Image: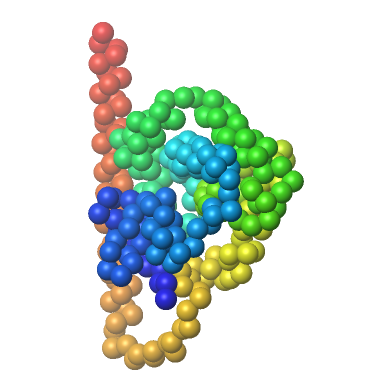
Amino acid sequence: MSINVDHKLKLRSKKGQLPFVELNGEEIADSAIIIKELSAKFDKDLDASLSLEQRNISHAMISMIENHLVWILFWWRTKYPDQFLKGYKVDLQHALGLRIPNRFLNFLFRFTFGRKWFQGTKKVKAQGIGVHKPEEIEEFGRRDIKVLSDILADKPFFFGDEPTTLDVVSFAVLSQLHFISKEVSVPLRDFMTESCPNIIGHVSRIKERCFPDWEEICSKLDLNAHLPKPEPEVKEGKEGETEKTAEQENNESDKIEKELEKDKADEKEKTEENKEKEEAK
């Protein structure tokens, strides 16, 4: 039986990666290694029917997706944190498992996520994508998606009537782009929708085939919609417990607000100091 665990954006593998799985007590990290190990364990090779040439094409395309296209999406998230939150309708309170109101968490996220010193931003630059101009990065993304579209052509899946590893990997990344809320302007998503309709069809086919409970998962944020649910326990709270919880939340909110105000004040002071130094030159 497979069980998905909510990592609360905190849990990582020993390699510091997501996703990772635990199989019979053994931790397996990195999606490529996970697929390889699970294929061997359950004797299921998604690429068994592929020719040598097709396997080579699959390897090249997966490398492009995992080492190039996925970084373009990551760049978009760090560059536009506000659009990231709106586009995926992220509930930070739920994702982080905190009681702090979302308005404070959202502000803190936007304040930190796109900063130059933020680890994600540093990673994007270190990888190489982040040093380019936004329009150049978007062009890189369009070219990657167009290549995938050309290979797919009018086939249901990349190599015929049945999905292979390339279909799985491409869905994992392209679905992140396709399902961004239409309320948010994302040029790369719009390009894929308008210029590569076969890719949109491919994403839909994988979704319908592998995730019949997609809507339930997305609406309820249920990581294990495939498992039966126990009856909810009804517990009588102690008198005054509600008031105490509300008081704790208010204290946490006040603390966050004060920290944010301090950060803004420090940043303003630093800006003024730099301005004075420039004027003194």
Residue at horizontal 34 percent and vertical 91 percent from the top: 236
Residue at horizontal 42 percent and vertical 50 percent from the top: 32
Viewer-nearest residue: 157 or 170: 157
Viewer-nearest residue: 244 or 122: 122
Q: Residue furthest right?
A: 154
User: Quarter-wise, where is residue 6 in the image?
Assistant: bottom left
| Image height of 168 relative to 119, above or below | below
Viewer-nearest residue: 17 or 254: 17
| Image height of 247 relative to 229, above or below | above
Is residue 87 something one can see in this rendering?
no
Name the spot of residue 131 as percent of width and height, x first.
Answer: 42, 25
Q: Quadrant of the C terminus?
A: top left
Is residue 149 something one can see in this rendering?
yes
User: Quarter-wise, where is residue 94 in the image?
Assistant: bottom left
Name the spot of residue 193 as percent of width and height, x first.
Answer: 69, 44
Residue at horizontal 33 percent and vertical 72 percent from the top: 246
Name the spot of residue 71 as percent of width and height, x first.
Answer: 45, 38
Residue at horizontal 38 percent and vertical 48 percent from the top: 109
Q: Residue furthest top?
A: 281
Figure colour scheme: rainbow
Relative to 29, 215 lies left or right: right
Relative to 197, 270 lies left or right: left
Name the spot of residue 189 as percent of width and height, x first.
Answer: 62, 42
Viewer-nearest residue: 205 or 182: 205
Q: Quadrant of the N terminus?
A: bottom left
